[in-house]
Amino acid sequence: MALSDVAVRNAKPGVKAVRMFDGGGLYLEISPSGGKLWRFKYRFGGKEKVLALGKYPEVSLKEARERRDDARKLLANDLDPSEHRKQQKAIKTERASNSFEVVAREWFAKYSRNWAPSHGKKIISRLENDLFPWIGGRPVADITAPDLLAALRRIEARGAVETAHRAKQNAGQVFRYAVATGRALRDPSQDLRGALTPWKPQHYPAITEPKEIGPLLRAMDAFTGTFAVKCALTLAPMLLVRPGELRQAEWSEFDLDAGTWNIPAEKMKTRAPHLVPLPTQAVAILRELQPLTGRGRFLFPGVRDHDHPMSENTINMALRRMGYPKEVMTGHGFRAMARTVLDEVLGFRPDWIEHQLAHAVRDPNGRAYNRTAHLEQRRKMLQAWADYLDTLKNGAEVIPLTRSA
């Protein structure tokens, strides 16, 4: 006789376990302590087996019957319901262990070793603050485009449009890594093209017109701050390095007799060593600076702590003191200045310029150039650039220089 809701609800325990059968192999087992458990008894491969279907009242009579019917369908297809459940549980466990956060941290650990620490810090912070709280615990294979978009919308809502776009980019890198390692089928971020508020990368403000560079150089020459900062200011437009590479420069990296600066890989954004040929003007500045800071580690030590380099804001603050607001010129802008003038005014080859900027320049076969590639050409280029800066600083008429190929 089939069970009823009332019969199940009013069933009382006995001294021993009591079984109340519903039909089709389904029964309710009541323990002496009063617990009520749904069971499905069946035969598979000539053996009698029992499958647990849940606890009453969490699982109602109706739901227990539905679970029994699902199990009977598996039997009809020659599948053991118990083994099927184990397989599904294993799959679920595996998917849970491959959550977005787990995969993202694995991806980060693999690739961040080739990034500058500051770059890696920005990415992991973006993941931890803006993505992990919302989709980090989800199996990476189950996350859909709407799921990702909901997380990105939270970033947009606080006005951080650039961060939302960068978070989408990082999420896409994680998804593609998951696809490559067999833990997802596709990258859902590709479906979000046009879904975010439009944003274009903002270039660092820079002075690139020769007629405006001269006054800037004269203002730098008249700078009344510390001598070390003045030297850093003078070298910044001359050497094409990033502000962080300049302020962290160490005396052990320089060979003034050979006129070279060897920047180790761990200091570079590309995580590859970089060689900077020094113009004669740069060597003269460094020889003048050496008696002041040469006994220490850094060319430009901090004012209060000589065991650390000067602050990352020092150059920009000096520019502000000279009357150049952040919307007009920044320390990073010296690179854009050199790139523009070397190409458009002095006519040097773009690949020489890009290599000197320590960008990822590759040869025709796709291989990255080593640090000594085009060294003599780059040395002549930087010397011509330093000479040209002198002409601008001295107020000479702005005339494009000619050079031999």
Image: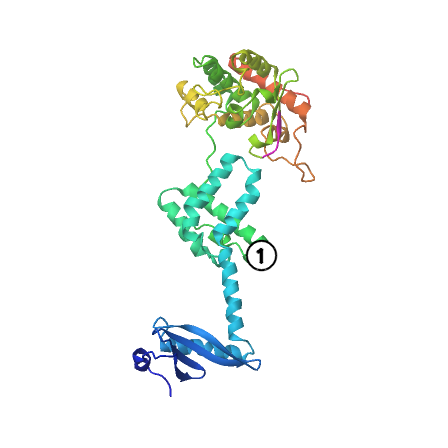
In percent of width and height, residue 335 lies at: 53, 27
Q: Specify the quadrant of the image occupied by residue 109.
A: top right
Residue at left 49%, top 62%? 92
Q: Is residue 315 left or right of residue 177?
A: left
Residue 28 in sight in this render: yes
Query: Which of 183 and 225 lies nearest the eye of the viewer?
Result: 183
Residue at left 47%, top 43%? 166
Q: Is mark 1 on a helix, strand or loop?
A: loop
Residue at left 65%, top 15%? 257
Amino acid carrying label 1: it is Gly
Quarter of the image with the C terminus is top right
Say whether residue 274 is magenta.
yes
Q: Specify the quadrant of the image occupied by residue 361.
A: top right
* Residue that mark 1 sits on: 182
Magenta-tinted stretch? 271-275
Q: Which colour scheme is used?
A: rainbow
Location of residue 171 with respect to 236 vertically, above or below: below
Location of residue 306 with respect to 264 vertically, above or below: above
Residue 197 in sight in this render: no
Instruction: Determine the main secondary structure of the stretch shown in magenta.
Output: loop
Say whether residue 240 is magenta.
no
In percent of width and height, residue 197 lies at: 41, 46
Q: In this view, does 364 lie to the left or right of 20?
A: right
Q: Within 10 Å of the Cα at label 1, are there few (<14), some (14-19), or many (20+) other Cα atoms?
A: few
